[in-house]
Amino acid sequence: MQTKTYTSLGHEIPEHRFGMLTERTNLVNDGASLRAALDADGYLLLRDVLHKDEVLAAREEVFSRLVEVGEILTPAIDGMPTGTSRREEMYPDLGVFWRSVCEGPAIRRVTHAGPMLDIMGRILDGPVRPFDFLWLRAMAPGRASAFHFDHVYMNKGTDRLYTVWTALGDAPLEDGPMLLVEGSHRWDDLIADYRGMDVDKDKSRPGHVTMDPVALADERDCRLLSTNFRAGDILIVTMFMLHGSLDNCSPSGRVRLSCDTRYQRADEPIDPRWIGSPPIGHGGSYGGVGGARPLTAELIRR
C-alpha cells in the first residue's frame, strides 16, 4: 500500500493511479523470455545486474566533475548541490565540458561494456551496437522530466531500438526516478500521432506528449509506475513506452544522477545523429542537450 504521496511535474499522484514496476530479474539469462516480457509490458526492470562497484565509481567520476565547477559539495559521491555554479565561467564551450563528462572511462565501463552489453545481446539476439552519445541526467531537487516517447528523438535508423535507464547510485522514489505510463506502448491512437515525428524537422510542436501525467492517467484509466531503484538496477523500455519522471523531492536535497543509453543490433541501420566522435546530436553535439547547462540553469524541454 502506498504510504507516501508522490508528484510528477508538480502534479500529485493519487494512490489509485500509482503502482510499482514488475521485476523480471529471474528472466535475465533467457533472451526469448526477456523479449516476450518486453513486448507484453513495454519495459523490463532488472535488479542487481550491473556491478555495483562500477556503478558507484561512475557516480563518483561524474559528481567529481561537478565539484570541479562548483555545483556539488564534497564528498562528491553524496551528490549534494551547492546551489551555485562556475561551469560557464570555467568552460565557455559547455558542450566540450559535458562531452568530457559523458565520455569518462568509469561511466562508459557501465554503459558500453560488461553485463550491460551481455543483457542487451540476449534481448537483441545478436551483436549489439550502443549509440556513442550518452544522455547523462543530473536532476536537482524540484525537477522532473516531461512525458515523451523516445521515438521522436531517434528514428532515423532501425525500429528495434531500446533505451536503458540506469540509476547511478540508489534512487528511491523520493529522488525522482523514471516514471512509466502503464500500457502506453499499446496506445495505437496516440502512437500514430507521434510515429515518424522528428523533433529536428517538426518545429510546430514539442517532442513531449504531456506535462500532466496524472490527467493523462485519469483520461486513459491507467497507472503511473516506478520503484525504489538501487545501484546495479536497470530499466529497459521500448521506443513507444511513454515515460517521464517523478519530481526529485529528496529529503536530504541531493541530486538524482542517472543515464539513458540506447542499444540496437550492430547489423541494422543506425540513426547517424547519435554516432561518431563526437555525434552531431540535435546540433551542437553535447552542447545541444539540457545536461550541458549548469545545474542552476532553467530546464530546457524539446
Image (cartoon, helix red, strand yellow):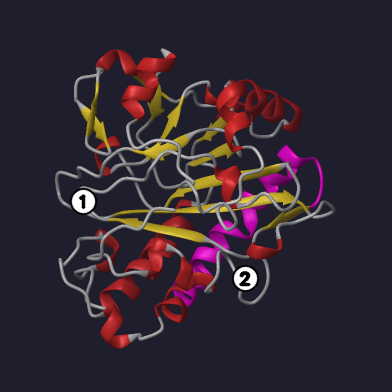
Q: Looking at the rendering, which quadrant does residue 2 occupy?
A: top left
Q: Residues within 10 Å of mark 1 (few under 14, many from 20)?
A: many
Residue 1 visible to the viewer:
no
Measured as percent of width and height from the top left, residue 282 is found at 55, 64
Q: Which mark is residue 141?
A: 1
Q: Main secondary structure of the magenta part?
A: helix
Q: For the magenta stretch, what is the residue range?
A: 99-127
From the viewer's perspective, tell me whether residue 199 is left or right of residue 3: right
Residue indicated by mark 2? 279
The residue sitting at 55% across, 53% down in the picture is: 199
Q: Looking at the rendering, which quadrant does residue 151 occupy?
A: top right
Between discs 2 and 1, the one toward the N terminus = 1
Q: Residues within 10 Å of mark 2 (few under 14, many from 20)?
A: some
Q: Which mark is residue 123?
A: none
The answer to if 123 sits in the magenta stretch is yes
The residue sitting at 20% across, 45% down in the picture is: 250
Residue sitting nearer the eye, 266 or 107: 266
